[in-house]
């Protein structure tokens, strides 16, 4: 990669394998392929501006957060080596079927049943790679609106840089901004039609995705797919 030492942020995510139909369809839903960076035509939904409703998840790419985006304290190469070692020590596992759900007003893909192996991987990434994370400054903390968080979430934000980790972590692949009931009535059926079948397919988690952001405001891209080999 070019310019990795000047990266804005990095993150560890789950994302569908390149040959998984969910990668193709989910990327088209968001309008961008995080593997290639290519812009993609989105489905047309009458009376809905889908590009506007997917602007934030499009920038982050189709993914579920394991270790949230953070600024590096040291080198990208050091992070990559430690993430690869952690992945190499983790055995592949089955991911339960996914289904479209409403999460705090957002549309997202959620697990049909909890996946302890994925939760354990998220926990390990947050804790064991924390030495690579630069603590957020006061402005970054303020953007999280800590006054609106529960005490446990505020503690997570201060200690780990993100409120939703460990017992507060929830698997979700974000598909939209927060929707009004009127928008949801139009958007959810379209998402179901396009994504439900692919989301419900059985799949095995065999890799960990390292995403990078080249500069503030730039889209995240998949920089590495690190194999699980434990």
Image (tube, rainbow, N blue to C red):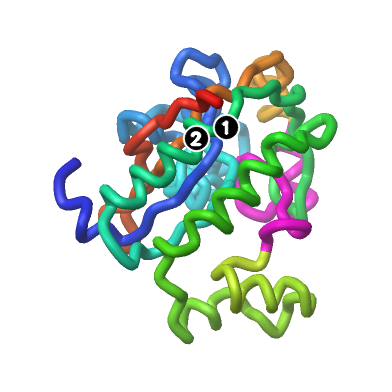
Q: Quadrant of the C terminus?
A: top right
Q: What residue sits 60% from the left and 49% below the top?
A: 124
Residue 167 vs residue 107, the one in the foreground: 167
- Quarter of the image for residue 137 reads bottom left
Residue 12 sits inside the magenta stretch: no
- Residue stretch rendered in magenta on the structure: 164-188
Residue contact at pointers 1 and 2, CB within 8 angstroms: yes
- In the rendered structure, the answer to whether residue 146 lies left or right of residue 206 reads right
Residue 181 vs residue 126, the one in the foreground: 126
Q: What residue sits 74% from the left and 44% below the top?
A: 184
Q: Secondary structure at mark 2?
A: helix
Q: What residue sits 48% from the left and 46% below the top?
A: 12
Residue assigned mark 1:
90
Q: What residue sits 48% from the left and 86% below the top?
A: 138
Q: Is residue 201 above or below residue 190?
A: above
Q: Position of residue 203 (x, y in %)?
A: 65, 17
Q: Position of residue 88 (x, y in %)?
A: 48, 31
Q: Position of residue 221 (x, y in %)?
A: 35, 41
Q: Is residue 102 above or below residue 16?
A: below
Residue 166 sits inside the magenta stretch: yes
Q: Quadrant of the N terminus?
A: top left
The residues tagged by marks 1 and 2 sit, at their Cα atoms, a distance apart of 5 Å
Q: Secondary structure at mark 1?
A: loop
Residue at the far left: name it: 2
Q: Position of residue 109 (x, y in %)?
A: 69, 35
- In the rendered structure, the answer to whether residue 139 lies left or right of residue 148 reads left
Mark 1 crowd level (few <14, some 14–19, many ≥20, 10 Å Cα): some
Q: Which mark is residue 87?
A: 2
């Amino acid at each position: 990669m070019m310019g990795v030492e000047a990266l804005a942020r990095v993150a560890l995510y789950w994302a569908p394998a390149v040959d998984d139909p969910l990668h193709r369809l989910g990327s088209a839903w968001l309008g961008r392929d995080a593997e290639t960076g290519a812009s993609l035509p989105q489905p047309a939904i009458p009376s809905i501006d889908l590009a506007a409703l997917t602007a934030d998840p499009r920038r982050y790419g189709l993914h579920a957060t394991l270790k949230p985006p953070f600024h590096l304290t040291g080198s990208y190469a050091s992070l990559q080596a430690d993430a690869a070692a952690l992945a190499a020590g983790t055995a592949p596992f089955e991911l339960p079927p996914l289904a479209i759900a409403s999460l705090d007003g957002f549309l997202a893909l959620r697990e049909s049943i909890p996946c302890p192996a994925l939760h354990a991987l998220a926990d390990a990434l947050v804790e064991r790679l924390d030495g690579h994370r630069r603590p957020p400054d006061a402005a970054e903390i303020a953007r999280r609106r800590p006054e609106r968080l529960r005490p446990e979430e505020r503690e997570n934000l201060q200690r780990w840089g993100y409120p939703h980790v460990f017992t507060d972590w929830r698997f979700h692949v974000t598909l939209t901004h927060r929707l009004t009931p009127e928008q949801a009535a139009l958007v959810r059926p379209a998402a179901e039609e396009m994504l439900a079948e692919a989301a419900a397919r059985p799949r095995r988690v065999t890799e960990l995705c390292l995403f990078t952001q080249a500069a503030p405001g730039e889209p995240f891209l998949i920089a590495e797919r690190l194999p699980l080999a434990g």
